[in-house]
């Protein structure tokens, strides 16, 4: 089959797409699996790659995380992959990347995810030409706090909180991504001791191999805060072993040396987070820290950072073949048989505020309904108010939905 060669420079709309039970490895743009085709590779890490994918029947764009079955088995990661799916299925927050669907082909496991803008916080903050205002940093950190509050409320510990896993929407809002190392069943005082994550963002307890709680995620938030505020790293070296040596030999976190441009209330904020358990500040107390006092907590989703230059990946950039490495189908029993899932994702965000009232802000709807019910008038008058206001309410709902 030479489709990949024939379509090397063809415009995307000219490519014939053939339904298949697996992606055409010569050019995955030419085949659709479960209604999706791949348009472009966005990145890779570990044993997974992420692609820009398109739903063929309507052109909607998603991110698709793809893992090779043989690699999952080779690295003894079947349970971890199944756990990732199980955890991600139950997450439904404006501050967390939404799992849309999952399925498996004879050779691969695929997770269809909500598409944020292509850049993550690391790419943006490492861009020396990007001008990042202090207020924008505070709002990003606030959204990370809300995202972590939600995860911990769901008894989920992320375990890999770092800038690369903080994605940005086109409106500049934070979405926490990548639940490959996450652990469920983590209450406030539940301990675990697995060493995992990214060394420069791992808490000392994890590196010392002593039991730690879900506040390990808060340490990761502190590392991100330091990097965003200063544009620098906490460590002089990128060498993992020297970082491990430094953190495991400390008697107190006061021994940490902070960048010279971290001062005042910003220093107080980072220092409150980068402490050993149990002295580490809680998420609830972080909200009240003076560093974040400017943050519009009650209307954070209506806030859009100005000059946000986050662009969605455009389909017209997908002019090159998407080549996948050829890999064998599994023989015998397939451990991924129960992997298929489809979420009711379009309806989900409207339900979020109903399910989790403590994350809620007062909505136009609540204000309107209270006004309507408290107005001292008869049914006819109330009906007149309702029919007058209803079109405005619909316009409001449409603009609210566009935030997502």
Image (tube, helix red, strand yellow):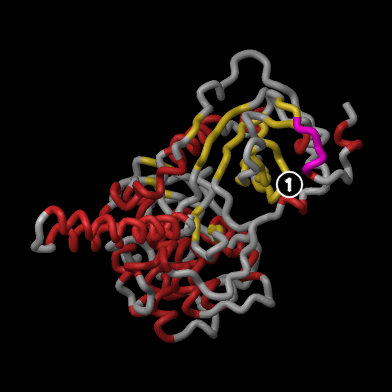
Above or below, 86 relative to 120: above
Question: How many numbered marks have been drawn onto this rendered protein structure?
Answer: 1
Task: Tell me what residue is drawn at x 61 percent, y 34 percent.
Answer: 110
Magenta region: which residues?
13-17
Q: Position of residue 57 (x, y in %)?
A: 64, 36
Q: Is residue 290 above or below residue 324?
A: below
Give the left or right position of residue 166, taking residue 71 as reference.
left
Q: Quadrant of residue 145?
A: bottom left
Magenta segment main secondary structure: loop
Q: Residue at the location (29% across, 47% down)? A: 355
Q: Which residue lies furthest to the top in this view?
A: 332
Q: In which quarter of the image is residue 56?
A: top right
Residue 402 is situated, as x and y percent measured from the top left of the image, at: 48, 57
Let me know if residue 2 appears in the view. Answer: yes
Residue closer to the observer: 305 or 163: 305
Q: Give neighbour class at mark 1: few <14, some 14-19, many 20+ (Cα, 10 Å).
A: many
Q: Is residue 166 magenta?
A: no
Quarter of the figure with the N terminus: top right
Circle 1 sits on which residue? 40
Residue 213 makes an appearance in the image? no
- Most foreground residue, 351 or 401: 401
Q: Where is residue 122 in the image (x, y as percent from the top left)?
A: 61, 64
For the point 53% across and 43% down, the residue is 180
Look at 53% across and 79% down and name the residue there. Answer: 133
Q: Is mark 1 on a helix, strand or loop?
A: strand
Left or right of 84, for residue 301: left
State the residue in front, 331 or 233: 331
Q: Decide whether residue 15 is among the magenta residues.
A: yes
């Amino acid at each position: 089959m030479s489709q990949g060669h024939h379509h090397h420079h063809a415009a995307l709309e000219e490519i014939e797409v053939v339904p298949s039970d697996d992606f055409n490895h010569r050019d995955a743009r030419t085949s659709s699996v479960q209604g999706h085709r791949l348009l472009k590779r966005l990145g890779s890490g570990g044993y997974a790659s992420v692609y820009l994918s398109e739903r063929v029947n309507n052109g909607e764009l998603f991110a698709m995380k793809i893992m090779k079955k043989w690699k999952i088995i080779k690295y003894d990661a079947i349970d971890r992959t199944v756990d990732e799916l199980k955890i991600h299925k139950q997450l439904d927050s404006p501050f967390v990347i939404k799992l849309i669907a999952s399925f498996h082909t004879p050779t691969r496991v695929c997770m269809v995810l909500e598409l944020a803008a292509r850049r993550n916080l690391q790419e943006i903050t490492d861009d020396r030409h990007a001008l990042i205002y202090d207020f924008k940093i505070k709002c990003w950190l606030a959204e990370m706090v809300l995202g972590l509050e939600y995860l911990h409320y769901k008894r989920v510990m992320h375990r890999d909180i770092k800038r690369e896993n903080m994605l940005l929407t086109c409106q500049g809002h934070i979405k926490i991504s990548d639940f490959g190392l996450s652990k469920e069943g983590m209450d406030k005082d539940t301990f675990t001791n697995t060493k995992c994550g990214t060394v420069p963002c791992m808490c000392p307890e994890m590196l010392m191999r002593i039991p730690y709680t879900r506040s390990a995620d808060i340490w990761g938030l502190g590392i991100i805060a330091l990097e965003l505020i200063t544009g620098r790293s906490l460590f002089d070296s990128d060498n993992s072993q020297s970082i491990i040596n430094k953190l495991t030999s400390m008697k107190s976190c006061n021994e940490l040396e902070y960048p010279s441009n971290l001062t005042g209330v910003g220093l107080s904020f980072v220092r409150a987070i980068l402490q050993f358990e149990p002295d580490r500040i809680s998420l609830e107390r972080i909200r009240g820290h003076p560093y974040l006092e400017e943050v519009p907590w009650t209307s954070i989703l209506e806030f859009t950072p100005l000059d946000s230059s986050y662009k969605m990946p455009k389909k017209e950039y997908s002019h090159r073949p998407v080549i996948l490495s050829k890999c064998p189908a599994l023989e015998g029993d397939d451990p991924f048989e129960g992997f298929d899932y489809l979420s009711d994702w379009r309806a989900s965000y409207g339900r979020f505020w109903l399910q989790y009232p403590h994350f809620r802000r007062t909505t136009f709807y609540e204000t309107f309904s209270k006004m309507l019910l408290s107005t001292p008038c008869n049914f006819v008058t109330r009906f007149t108010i309702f029919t007058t206001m209803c079109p405005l309410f619909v316009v409001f709902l449409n603009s609210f939905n566009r935030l997502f």
